[in-house]
Image (cartoon, helix red, strand yellow):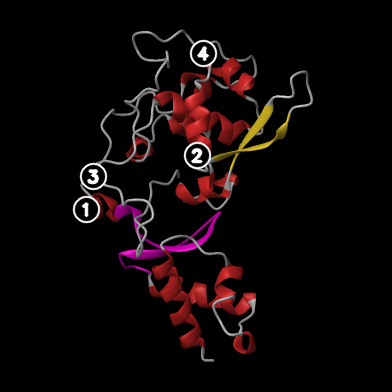
Amino acid sequence: MSEQHRKNVIEAALLAAGKSLQVAELIELFEPASRPTREEVRAALDALAGDYAGRGIELKETGGGFRIQVRRELTAEISRLWPERPPRFSRALLETLALIAYRQPLTRGEIEAVRGVAVNPNIVKTLIERNWVRVLGQRDVPGRPELLGTTREFLDYFGLKSLDELPPLAELKVMAEFNVQLDLDTAFPGETDDPDGRAPAQPAADAPPEVSDGPGEELDEEADPGQQPEGSHGLVAARPEPE
């Protein structure tokens, strides 16, 4: 098998999949007799990344594997292909997700201790249903509360290769791009932390102020209307990525 054919197969698979693919999944595309090694697949991926240099698409490695996507700097124009509005999430959900991402594993009670308000069950349910958060185990204390942590899909959605690529907490409040994907103007039923009725947060002693203030507090309320519908195939539109 020629290197060009191998690269073509991998490129076609990444375009057709509409999601990230692991190296092991790419290897399985080939017949057993001509199956490439991991090193050969990596070399083909490197060659593709070089081919896309300076173009409108790029090869991106995330926690979920590799994907071909629109370059982030072009998303403002490309988003006009999908005029429907993206899913809208409350500020409370964003705060909860950020706490789990930065301080995992932690329990719902520990989240409440930092935020100063009760965690609406719908928030955790939504995060689990979207497969951004999962139960990692149970804290060995009375009541054995569930420990929550992020998933590989969380990394893939936000374009992160690992949790080490999360930005410093101090940067979250000035990342206007963050609310392109996480619009902040819809609260869950029963959620009390709106500007008029929110109880003041009482952060835990060891909680950095950036977390207890709530990442996204100062973001604009209107989200970018464009987002590729989930499950669509072909090129994956670049999602806003923390820098």
* Badge 1 amino acid: Glu
Find disc 3 in the rendering and name its residue: 84
Find disc 4 in the rendering and name its residue: 117
Earlier in the chain: of badge 1 and badge 4, it is 1
* Badge 2 amino acid: Glu
Q: Nearer the viewer, mark 3 or mark 4?
A: 3
* Badge 3 amino acid: Glu
Instruction: Tell me the distance, in whole angstroms, between the alpha carbons under discs 1 and 3.
Output: 14 Å
Q: Nearer the viewer, residue 160 or 85?
A: 85
Residue 129's tag is 2
Q: Are marks 1 and 4 in contact (CB under 8 Å)?
A: no
Query: Residue reaching furthest bottom?
Result: 1
* Badge 4 amino acid: Val
Q: Secondary structure at mark 4?
A: loop
Earlier in the chain: of badge 3 and badge 4, it is 3
Q: Is residue 9 left or right of residue 100?
A: left
Q: Secondary structure at mark 3?
A: loop
Q: Is residue 123 left or right of residue 112?
A: left
Q: Nearer the viewer, mark 2 or mark 3?
A: 2
Q: Residues within 10 Å of mark 3 (few under 14, many from 20)?
A: few
Q: Is residue 80 left or right of residue 87?
A: left
